[in-house]
Image (cartoon, rainbow, N blue to C red):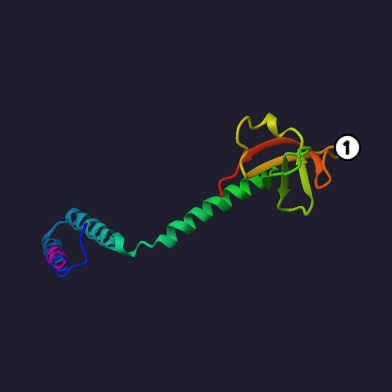
Amino acid sequence: MFGANKKSIEEIIIIFNNFYDLYRKGSQHMKNMLKIACLFITLSLYNCNSVKGTDTKDISSAKTDVQQTTSKEMIEKGFSKGTIATSKSKECPYILTIEEYTDKLDPMNIEKFFKGDVPKQVWVKFASLRMPSRCNEARPVSILEIETRKE
């Protein structure tokens, strides 16, 4: 509403002086209206911020907060943070690595969830399978639910 330059400050002083003159001469109703107007003007001035003060770090921290909120929600829903890598082995084309675990997993039914390209970062719910491994480097799991992770 008002900038922080010298001219607008002078205008504000003039407005306050006019309000004060009306306040001294006016009725009780008028005095209440002037108090409300002065409060409104004071709040308006207080809330005027320049755009120059906006920092890109604030924006990136807001994105991080959203990602942390999303991570927290997904973990509460029972998902684990995972990364899918393609394997050189023909027996197990994909290797799933979960952040909380050190061992590698062989997602047996991943084709059921992704027809084309398999995303690299995912949220996943899985169950261990009691069967022989298809490959030596990972143990077999069945994916129950999977979602792409944007981080």
- For the question of whether residue 111 can be seen, the reply is yes
Quadrant holding the N terminus: bottom left
> Few, some or many C-alpha atoms within 10 Å of disc 1 (few <14, some 14-19, many ≥20)?
few
Q: Nearer the viewer, residue 94 or 54?
A: 94
Q: Is residue 61 above or below residue 85?
A: below
Q: Examine the image and state in which quarter residue 132 appears.
A: top right
Q: Which residue, given by chain and number where applicable, does mark 1 sit on? A: 130
Part of the protein shown in magenta: 11-15
Residue at 17% over, 55% down: 30
Residue 77: horizontal and vertical position, in percent? 67, 42
Apparent side of residue 81 relative to residue 54 in the rendered image (left or right): right
Secondary structure mostly taken by the magenta-highlighted segment of the chain: helix
Indicate the secondary structure of the residue bearing disc 1: loop
Is 14 contained in the magenta span? yes
Q: In the displayed structure, does residue 78 sit left or right of residue 53? A: right
Q: Name the image quarter holding residue 11.
A: bottom left
- Image-based side of 84 in relation to 34, left or right: right
**Type of the residue with mark 1:** Arg
Image coords of residue 97 (percent x, y): 72, 48
Residue 42 highlighted magenta (yes or no): no
Residue 38: give x, y in percent of width and height.
22, 60
